[in-house]
Amino acid sequence: MSEGAEPTVAEVKRYYDYWTEGEVSDANCFDVFPIYLLAEVGDGDGNKGVALILRTGYAFTEIETWLEGVFATREEAMDWMLSQGRCVRAG
């Protein structure tokens, strides 16, 4: 990536799993949590977009992860999340 390569979906998920494990430790644990991730994605044909990945669950039982959609821009992904009541815009 230091040379400009984009992460693969598997790499994004692996990092996200690593990050979540650190956040859901005994010191940081809470019962139910939603997490939203925006990741820039692309394919070999030069098509690009912003993937909206949602994750929710219980820290000690099960965490579900799914791709909500791919949007043209980060702003479109955020607007969709706002329209669905999934987040609020600060400031």
Image (cartoon, rainbow, N blue to C red):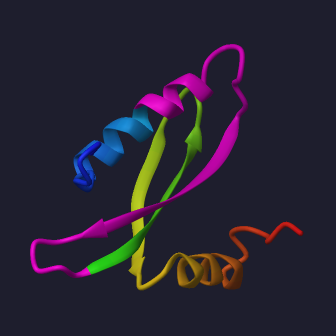
Magenta highlight range? 18-47
| Viewer-side residue, 22 vs 43 | 43
**x%, y% of residue 13?**
34, 45
Q: Is residue 74 above or below residue 36?
A: below
**Across the whole image, how many numbered discs are drawn on residues?**
0
Task: List the single residue furthest toward the front.
Answer: 3
Q: Quadrant of residue 46?
A: bottom left
**x%, y% of residue 35?**
59, 51
Q: Is residue 72 above or below residue 50?
A: below
Q: Who's the residue at 38% across and 65% down the image?
A: 40
| Viewer-side residue, 9 vs 7 | 7
Q: Does 29 lie within the magenta span? A: yes
**x%, y% of residue 12?**
34, 47
Q: Does 33 lie within the magenta span? A: yes
Q: Quadrant of residue 76?
A: bottom right
Task: List the single residue furthest toward the right.
Answer: 91
| Viewer-side residue, 32 vs 79 | 79
Q: Who's the residue at 42% across and 85% down the image?
A: 72
Q: Who's the residue at 59% across and 31% down the image?
A: 59
Task: List the single residue furthest toward the left.
Answer: 44
Task: List the single residue furthest toward the top.
Answer: 26
Quarter containing the C terminus: bottom right
Q: Is residue 1 left or right of residue 22?
A: left
**x%, y% of residue 4?**
26, 54
Q: Is residue 13 left or right of residue 80?
A: left
Q: Who's the residue at 73% across and 31% down the image?
A: 30
Quarter containing the N terminus: top left
Q: Is residue 7 left or right of residue 56?
A: left
Q: Quadrant of residue 53?
A: bottom left
